[in-house]
Image (cartoon, rainbow, N blue to C red):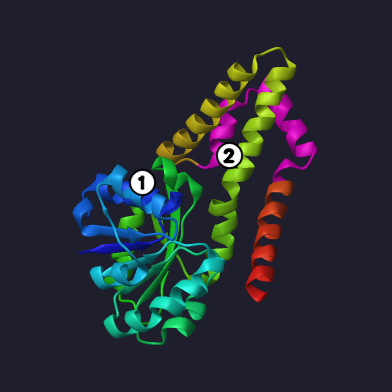
Amino acid sequence: MKIGFIGAGNMAGAIIDGIVASGLVGAGDIVTHDPDSSKAAGLAHRTGIAACAGNEEVVAASDIVVLAVKPQQLPGVLEQVAGQIVAKAPLVVSIAAGVTLKHLDGWLGPNVPVVRVMPNINATVGQGMAAVAGNDVATDSQVDSVAQLFAAAGKAIQLEERLFPAFTAVAGSSPAWVFLFVDALARGGLAAGMTKHQAREAATQAVLGSAALLQQSGEHPWQLIDKVSSPGGTTVAGMNVLEDRGFSAAVVAAVAATIEREAELAGG
């Protein structure tokens, strides 16, 4: 199986790193092209894959073509290679945010298997979360294969495309909110006399460890909250302030606002 990446940015690099490290596909069977030739050359040098002279060469060399470009760049890319893709019918994978399978089918026609993937920024450190959905032409085996490839950079789940906006909020946008939470924790520690470095390191590790504990324990979040909280203790005092000031409600509202904004962008 040969994989071609049209686009050689950070997300493409993260996915390629995961694929090669997992042994699913060797570096010698992966190619890329990017309008910024230095990006493609740098990625090729770092990972051992091959850099192609153009997008047409990527399609010609590949069984799977990954469209790893920004949404606004996608129409131009597909205008260039759509005819070649239709004639060859490789499996096409798109990671362009907000570009639906219906849009992709409109560009490529009804006979090209397409899988849409929504990854997140944490793939760049091998801890990504991706949602995967295929069009009517893509087989279960093809969708499974794509999920496997993206799981190499973290985790991947198969999800109905209608739920992608919710996934975007819960897994795609939420890293920014987590960073905001870490920064707020660190600022609280700084105000109490910790150094910036101490406060940020403590807050970051607390969030990292909490996520790992939640994942590995299999317990409900509130079960773990109860384990941390002693009656009348410090944790309860802080929890009461967070809830009094609308912490949970604000997060739920942020998810809803993200979904609403994605609908507006898709409509535009």
Which residue is at a point 48% across and 84% down the rendered structure image? 106
Task: Give the answer, above or below, for where 151 lies relative to 107.
Answer: above
With 152 as the anchor, is 262 left or right in this view? right
Q: Which residues are magenta?
A: 220-248
Does the image show residue 2? Answer: yes
Q: CA distance from mark 1 to mark 2?
A: 46 Å
Does the image show residue 155? Answer: no
Seen from the viewer's position, the closer of residues 18 and 242 is 18
236 inside magenta stretch = yes
**Label 2 crowd (10 A; few <14 / some 14-19 / many >=20):** few
Q: Label 1, on which residue?
A: 42
The mark that comes first in sequence, 1 or 2, is: 1
Quadrant where the N terminus sits is bottom left
Q: Secondary structure at mark 2?
A: helix
Q: Position of residue 185 (x, y in %)?
A: 66, 28
Q: Amino acid at mark 1?
A: Gly
- Res 222 label: 2
With 119 as the anchor, is 143 left or right in this view? left
Q: Position of residue 259 (x, y in %)?
A: 65, 63
Task: Give the answer, above or below, for where 185 lies relative to 34.
Answer: above
Q: Amino acid at mark 2?
A: Trp
- Res 237 label: none
* Furthest residue toward top: 193
Choose mark 1 or mark 2, whichever is in front.
1
173 inside magenta stretch = no
* Furthest residue toward right: 245
Which residue is at a point 27% across and 70% down the rendered structure image? 141
Q: Secondary structure at mark 1?
A: helix
| Res. 59 image quadrant | bottom left
